[in-house]
Amino acid sequence: MSTDKKPRADSTLKTLPSDRQAAIAEYARTHTLTETRAWLKEDGLTTSEAALSEFLSSWRLQQQLKRNGSTVETLLANLQQTRPDWTPEQIQQVGQSFFTALALEQQDPKQWFLIQQTAIKKDQLHLDRQKFQRETAELFVKWHADKEAQEILRSTGSNTEKIERLGQIMFGDDWK
Amino acid sequence: MNPAEREQLRLSLLRFLADNPTRFGFNAALLLQMARNEGRRALTRQEVEDEMTYLEDKQFAALVNKAISPENRVWRITGEGRDFIAQQTT
């Protein structure tokens, strides 16, 4: 039996240099998962939507924890100056409590829900735009040879008037 | 939780620990919230504690030493845990 196993797609992303990972996360911030996958593919990197989603979750969590850790280390440095009698263990204990409280606040379910909903809406807008573009192209194919439509286009009215008349013949009662 | 769900929870918990770049550990409350944010809305703290005990037994996670209130457990990932995560395959 073969022992060859396919490596996880997200482990491929995680093994990229950190600046490349940061670039992917930055791109994904303003693009959908589908767009990000296509962008990666142009660069020769194939990954699944699930793997990309997991990579981005992991990346964002790491960045958030780094910021939390940094905040706590700064607090501890100040604490050590004001409490020189405290042992390293006491300082570490306080740091651990601060860090946990801060990280827990960042993982607040309402915040997380909003982030997820924004990502879902962004993907939905992309799908809606794709659907609109396809339907527009399909309507053009269907109507470009229509005699009545051609007469309207050749008429002397303004563009606004032509659009109004075309809309009425194409969509009937559904127009506006 | 069925066995498949338990397995996924264990992997998620280990992944959370692996993603921690700081010198501080995670307690059960934080791990619970992270796991719930992945959709496990009915997950309980006890279930998280039980699976963390499992991961400790497997030596993939270790308790962070605490002089005060050691009963409030805090975990970090071990080298074995990191190696396991890195070797995860489909």
Image (tube, coloured by chain):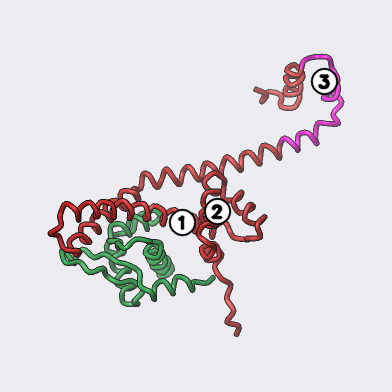
Residue A150 in magenta stretch: yes
At mark 1, the secondary structure is: helix
Residue that carries the numbered disc 3 in the rendered image: A152
Q: Label 3: chain?
A: A
Q: Label 2: chain?
A: A
Residue that carries the numbered disc 2 in the rendered image: A24
Horizontal side, residue A97 vs residue B16: left or right:
left
Q: Amino acid at mark 3?
A: Ile
Chain coloured green here: B
Q: Amino acid at mark 1?
A: Trp
Q: Is residue B59 above or below residue A155?
A: below
Instruction: Give the percent coordinates (x, y) of residue A75.
Output: 25, 51
Residue that carries the numbered disc 1 in the rendered image: A59
Horizontal side, residue B6 vs residue B64: left or right:
right
Q: Judge the density around disc 2: few (<14), some (14-19), many (≥20) Cα neighbours within 10 Å.
A: many
Q: Earlier in the sequence, mark 1 or mark 3?
A: 1
Q: What's the distance in space between the residues labelled 3 and 2, CA to CA?
A: 49 Å
Q: Is residue A131 above or below residue A173?
A: below
Q: Judge the density around disc 3: few (<14), some (14-19), many (≥20) Cα neighbours within 10 Å.
A: some
Q: Magenta part of the protein: which range?
A: A136-158
